[in-house]
Image (cartoon, grey):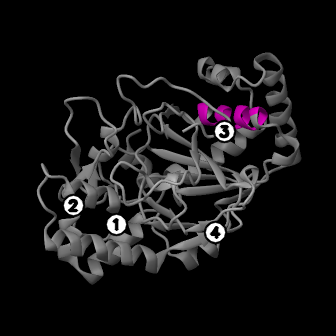
Amino acid sequence: MDAMNQGREAGREPAVAGKPVIDPADWTADQLMGCDDWLLAAEAREISHLVEMARGIAGRIGDDAGRLLAMSRADFDIGPFAGRLEAIMAQVKDGLGLALYRGLPMDDLSLIEAAIIYWGIGRHIGEATSNNPEGDMIGHVTDTGKDYRDPKHRGYQTNVTMDYHCDQTDIVTLLCINTAKSGGQSKIASSIAVYNELLKRDGAAAEILTQPYCWTKHSEKDTGEANYYQSPVFNFLGGVLCTSFGPKHMEKGHDLAEAPDMTAAQLKALRLMEQVAEDLHAEMDLARGDIQFVNNYTILHTRTGFEDWPEPERKRVLWRLWLMADGFRPSTPYSEQWLKGVSLTATKERITLVYEG
């Protein structure tokens, strides 16, 4: 069944540029926080099965997380969690665009056991892609002391407030390993709602955002490749609206010597979209053991700046999976650029339990 027909069944109508988009993922903060369809608490039966599965696999592979790369979906028997995951993915794909699963018992799990559960869940969703040129298939979202202003660095490697953005893949998941001493709240906004609000406030800005911008590759490219690529923010594909957004990526792209300057109208539209996202956003705290699931085509996300604990072992850490899933929304030029993740000729896939740089 194509995306348009699936959408009709889910309360979605064919999306057309310049007109309000009717989609289940159109919500405001009050509407999202007024329902609990996207919140799922862990149940003892499913947790017991996941833990037993993880300990069985850990008994065979030890602490060598890299051995997970050779394991298929069938190697991860998630038992009763399969039904829960089906509900999660229905919400992410054709519902509100996100889900939050609370209660993975991190205090009772070793890091390798947590990685087995998390990777296994990801394998049941789709194909993981590399988070960086080093080949990290589970990304470590933590402050590494890097400068967000540097075109070569990404925001997830810092502790500063980030901009509203979408990641490169169909789905992004985050497992909270450690929380910050303060700050680091997750902020999300419906990109469908943002588009509809932009139509009301400034239709010309909404139209500009359907045209290509230049995006930096953060020097994550092979020799001879261009330093940037082009993608619109709002993409109307197959009767659905698919959003790609990354203000810092876009500004850094246009700042490159070989790229055209961003026009005043383009910058104004970008800034207005950021403001609308802030006006409509919802906020949540991710606790240790929470897993957040997000549809990158319908949800903008960011996080507030944070202060870390002084002890290295208590540093804020989130594990990130970038996932591509069959039959999801159509790929945008942005996501097409990264179908294999941040993967270069020399990239070798790896899974590490702690950040290795």
Whole-number angstrom distance, CA of label 4 to CA of label 2? 30 Å
> How many residues crowd around disc 4 within 10 Å: few (fewer than 14), some, or many (20 or more)?
few
Give coordinates of residue 43: x percent, y percent: 84, 49
Dot 1: what SS?
loop
Q: Cβ–Cβ below 8 Å for labels 2 and 3? A: no
> How many residues crowd around disc 1 within 10 Å: few (fewer than 14), some, or many (20 or more)?
many
Q: How many marks?
A: 4
State the extent of the magenta-drawn residues as a range: 112-123
Q: Is residue 201 above or below residue 3?
A: below
What is the number of the mark on residue 284? 4
Using the rendered image of the protein, determine whether residue 185 is visible from the camera's viewpoint.
no
Q: Which residue is mark 3?
A: 354
What is the number of the mark on residue 352? none
Residue 261's image quarter? bottom left
The label nearer to you, 4 versus 3, is 3
In the image, taking residue 345 as reference, residue 95 lies left or right, namely right
Dot 4: what SS?
strand
Using the rendered image of the protein, determine whether residue 112 is visible from the camera's viewpoint.
yes
- Give yes or no for residue 337 being in the magenta stretch: no
Q: Which residue is mark 1?
A: 21
Residue depicted at x 30% and y 46%: 334
The label nearer to you, 2 versus 3, is 3
Q: Which residue is mark 2?
A: 210
